[in-house]
Amino acid sequence: MTDRRDEIQLDLRDFAAGGLGDLDVEMGVETSAPASAPASAVRSGGGLDRYRHLVPTEHEKRSCAGMGPRIRAREIARKRQDPKVALGDQLSSAAHANDVEKVRSLLEQNADPNHVHFEVCCDVPLARTKSPEVAKLLLAHPEINVNARDINRYSIFSSMVLHNRENVELVSQILAHKDLDVHAGEPIKVAARFAPTSMLRTLLHHPRLSINDPCGLLHCAVRRTDAACLEVVTWLLQHEELDINLRADGGSTALMNVGGWDSLTIEIGEKEAVKRRQIAERQVKILQMLLARSDLDVTACDSKNDTALHRMSRAGRLDLVQVLLKDPRCLPCMWQQNADAESPLDAAVAAREKEKSRKRWESAPPLAKFDQVLGLLEAFAEKKKAELAKLVPRELARHPGTWSMAVQSL
């Protein structure tokens, strides 16, 4: 019994030496990046002969993790017997702590600026810091790989933009590096989805980044669910060079994306229904801002021949359909047929029928009001038909019945 207690105490010391604060990566994570030998051995189950003599404690027998944490801590301690690995881990920790002097000292001791110790952390030091001064030191190193990617294939640049959305000074440091691939990981798209206008402004100052990026910055901005979406959309629309009819994935325009949802976060204390109403109100304002542009192509179709009216009708968004139908440019969309030979009215009918057969465990379309949308579209179509019937072309003045039949066939 005394021997087992001594062994457990030794294991705890090994675990502490391995760095409790950095043990935040699960053992089972797979990666295409080159992993160190101990990490790959622990993940695959091979190379563990050295631990066959270990006997699980009572706690480990009851734990789902078993002896995994103890073996991992020993692997970390064993790996850190290599001075290069020990220096690299210290550099990673110092960068995470934003300790400028410590980072400078470790770099002078020839610590690897691209060090990755997968048992401890899967990020390079540059991706862990939030300090512009630390980033400047690392970026000045002649061996720095500024385009390194993590196990999720995120580039350092896109990761910085995502996790440091308001830290413009930090992002500016890496943005100025001569070897940076500014398109890797689509950082400009990440900024349009999550960052404030200050970050977008900084990125677009770079000569190789454009406001008309193929990813569609306006497309991403109109789908945002945070309160900053109005500010970002307003700022983008102020640029004369912005192509408001830019086609992104699937041939969609920004107008077609209004009413869509990006990632939605419900904070503690918030009510989901209230937040969805707030988002809907902002989407109505965004739609009005887009329709105020004279160069907007309201009748544009995507790869499925859907118009914006098709999409909004299919979603049951009465508030958006009402605003869209007030624009005279939307009239041809009423009878536009998509690839399934559906008009917006047909698309709304199909969506309503699909909603009726929805399983109880399936999520309902947010803010959908199919019956009201159908009534609005039918009334609008009849009204416009009556107006068109009176506008007989000069060529058919002698045969008004022909024109009336054509209108009724719509």
Image (cartoon, helix red, strand yellow):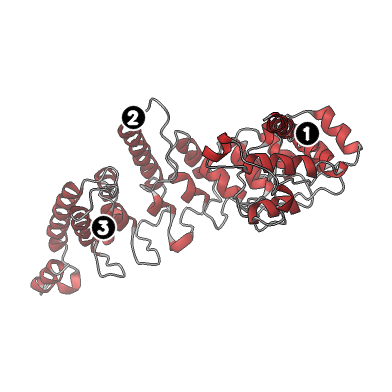
What's the CA distance linking mark 2 and mark 3? 37 Å
Location of the N terminus (image quadrant): top right
From the image, state whether disc 3 or disc 1 is nearer to you. 1
Q: Nearer the viewer, mark 2 or mark 3?
A: 2
Q: Position of residue 266 (x, y in %)?
A: 41, 33
- Identify whether 49 is placed above or below 403: above
**Are the residues tagged 3 and 1 within 8 Å (C-beta)?**
no
Q: Is residue 204 visible?
A: no
Is label 3 in a helix, a strand or a loop? Answer: helix
Name the amino acid type tagged 3. Answer: Leu
Indicate the position of residue 211 as horizontal and vertical percent values. Answer: 58, 50
Label 1: which residue?
Answer: 134
Disc on res. 331: 3
Say whether disc 2 or disc 1 marks the residue closer to the N-terminus.
1
Marks counted in the figure total: 3
Q: Amino acid at mark 2?
A: Lys
> Between marks 3 and 1, how big is the CA–CA gap?
57 Å
Residue 391 lies, in percent from the top left, at: 16, 62
Q: Left or right of 65: which side holds 290?
A: left
* Alpha carbon separation for disc pair 2 and 1: 40 Å
Q: Amino acid at mark 1?
A: Val
* Disc 1 element: helix
Which class describes the residues within 10 Å of circle 3: few (<14), some (14-19), or many (20+)?
some
User: Which mark, by number, is residue 9?
Assistant: none
Q: Which residue is mark 2?
A: 271
Q: Residue at 43% of width from left, 59% of height from top?
A: 252
**Secondary structure at numbered mark 2:** loop
